[in-house]
Amino acid sequence: MSTLTPEIEHTLRQGFKRFNPFMVAFFRLGLGPLINAWPDVGGRILVLTHTGRKTGQPRRTPVNYAVVQNDLYITAGFGAAADWYRNILKDPRVEVWLPDGWWAGVAEDVSESPERLPLLRRVLVASGFAAYAAGVDPRAFDDERLQAVTASYRLVRIRRAEARTGSGGPGELSWVWPLAAMGLLPLALRGLWPRRRA
């Protein structure tokens, strides 16, 4: 059973949906390492690229993750209704943007694994404030309580297949920074010149 009312859960879900495009933009600007600089608060975040089950188009979703024996584990905290989760069930081929790289991989639902609870706990601990916003304290809840409040959560393992490079990945817009610096340079230099008195 969730610790949240349906109304609060709906509001939280909509809030994350509205914030997601900004997170993707930060990764595209090369700020993935900065976003992950304080994982105890902001959590460990990757961008998951998956294929829309209806459109066939690539979709990008930021999610919290934990690394266990070189595999990535993520959770659908809003259960099986999450769009990205339904998409990977139809097509498990994914890409992940990590703070330190870009990988192609294969996603697999491991929600029925006997190791589900300890793995899920690791993902929730790695999610920073997000778990607490959902009413879950992964450090304090015992196994019985954690199991009860996360019964609807889906656990997904991503096995990385190969490193990716080239255009279309994280940092693809990092060229913006030198351009912005060049644009601001005249303004900065202008402040150094003494002003003429009228």
Image (cartoon, rainbow, N blue to C red):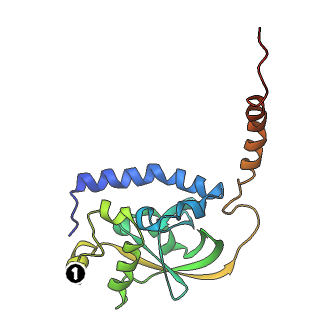
Please name the amino acid that badge 1 sits on: Asp
Task: Report the residue at 64% width, 75% height from top.
Answer: 103
Q: Is residue 195 above or below residue 73?
A: above
- Residue 3 lies in what quarter of the image? bottom left
Number of labels in the image equals 1
Whether residue 51 is visible, yes or no, is yes
- Nearest the camera: 120 or 33? 33
- Which class describes the residues within 10 Å of circle 1: few (<14), some (14-19), or many (20+)? few
The residue sitting at the bottom extreme is 114
| Picture coordinates of residue 90, whole percent (x, y) | 51, 73
Q: Which of 35 and 198 is in front in this view?
A: 198
Left or right? Give the position of 42 relative to 176: left
Residue at left offset 77%, top offset 38%:
185
Answer whether residue 56 is visible to the viewer in this image. no
> Does dot 1 land on a helix, a strand or a loop?
loop
Position of residue 148 in the picture relative to residue 38 (left or right):
left
Which image quarter: residue 101? bottom right
Residue marked by disc 1: 142
Direction from residue 51 to residue 11 in the image, left or right: left
Residue nearest the observer in this picture, 58 or 46: 46
Q: Position of residue 115 (x, y in %)?
A: 36, 89
What is the quadrant of the N terminus in the image? bottom left
Quadrant of image for the C terminus:
top right
Please give the name of the residue rendered at 30% of the width and 63% of the height, measured from the top-left corner.
Answer: 132
Residue 172: x and y, percent? 71, 57
On the picture, is 173 further left or further right than 16? right
Q: Which of 88 and 104 is in front in this view?
A: 104
Q: How far from the left and from the top, in percent, is residue 84?
A: 48, 65
